[in-house]
Image (spheres, helix red, strand yellow):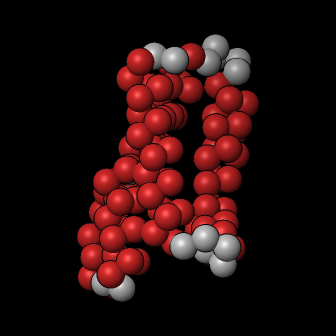
Amino acid sequence: MAAGFVTAAEAVAAVAPALAFVAAVPLGAGYGLCLLFGISEVTRIAAPDELAGLTAAFYGVTYLGMFGPPAFTLLGTLLPMPLLLTGAAALALLSLTAVTRGT
């Protein structure tokens, strides 16, 4: 996802719509993988009688991510969009670091 955010930042800075389509590939794949592995983790850790509730909670939190684009649009009125997208890339890398270290 970090690569997608960096590519999206470049697309915005260069006003290159074709590059935005390139950025959509890693961003979409990253979102899909997050869903896949997140629900797999929920399935792994949930007791049988807790699975439905934890799955619902997972999807509830996941769907909060749908507010990301409108939030970026609002924040884009205050900060340059390439800066916001680069910040999102940094957060993605921090998340990757935390997950790979097991914290």
Q: Nearer the viewer, residue 51 or 30?
A: 30
Q: How many marks?
A: 0
Which quadrant of the structure image shows residue 101? top left
Q: Nearer the viewer, residue 27 or 5?
A: 5
Q: Is residue 52 left or right of residue 26?
A: right
Which quadrant of the structure image shows residue 99? top left
Q: Residue at x 56, y 16 (%)?
A: 45
Residue 24: x %, y % from top left: 35, 67
Whether residue 77 is situated above or below residue 8 in the rendered picture: below
Answer whether residue 36 is visible to the viewer in this image.
no
Residue 43: x %, y % from top left: 53, 24
Residue 70: x %, y % from top left: 65, 71
Whether residue 1 is situated above or below residue 82 in the rendered picture: above
Q: Residue at x 37, y 50 (%)?
A: 2
Q: Is residue 60 left or right of residue 15?
A: right
Q: Residue at x 70, y 46 (%)?
A: 60
Which quadrant of the structure image shows residue 68? bottom right
Answer whether residue 58 is visible to the viewer in this image.
yes
Q: Nearer the viewer, residue 29 or 3?
A: 3
Q: Residue at x 50, y 54 (%)?
A: 87
